[in-house]
Amino acid sequence: MAELKGITDTVELFDAAGEIAVLVYKAQKGAANPGEVGTRVAAYIMAHPETIAKLKSAADGISEVPAEIKDLSLVEILELMSKAGAIAAKSAAAIKEA
């Protein structure tokens, strides 16, 4: 059996994607055009260094995602699906509140 890689980078990528989805949703509310959405997203990211760090970390680990998901054990599959569901629920709740 191949060495297990874990799911750390995959979960980190899912988490960053959920955060970006919420950010873009909030930015597009009341925006006159796509350029305004982009400006709002950029302004938020620049004002929140922790978001930059999170996105950078997810981007840095993205190349590991295929290796992580290639040979997942059943436990890792279930753990990944559980974490993905929690991230989706968190993002959906934040969008509902927006």
Image (tube, rainbow, N blue to C red):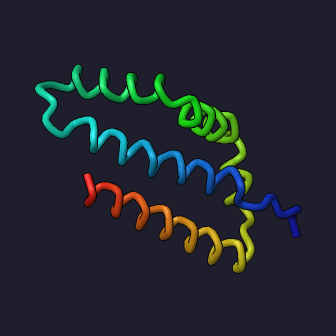
Compared with 51, 89 (above or below) is below
Compared with 72, 24 (above or below) is above
- Say left or right for 67 vs 19: right
Q: Quadrant of residue 75?
A: bottom right
In percent of the image, x 15 and y 25: which residue is there? 33
In percent of the image, x 52 and y 46: which residue is there? 16
- Say left or right for 40 vs 70: left
The foreground one among 90 and 82 is 90
In percent of the image, x 88 and y 70: which residue is there? 1
Compared with 24, 65 (above or below) is below
- Say left or right for 6 vs 15: right
Q: Position of residue 52 (x, y in %)?
A: 56, 30
Total labels drawn? 0
Q: Quadrant of residue 96?
A: bottom left
Compared with 46, 66 (above or below) is below
Q: Quadrant of residue 68?
A: bottom right
In percent of the image, x 70 and y 72: which residue is there? 76
Q: Position of residue 9 (x, y in %)?
A: 68, 50
Q: Position of residue 19 (x, y in %)?
A: 45, 47
Q: Position of residue 28 (x, y in %)?
A: 22, 36
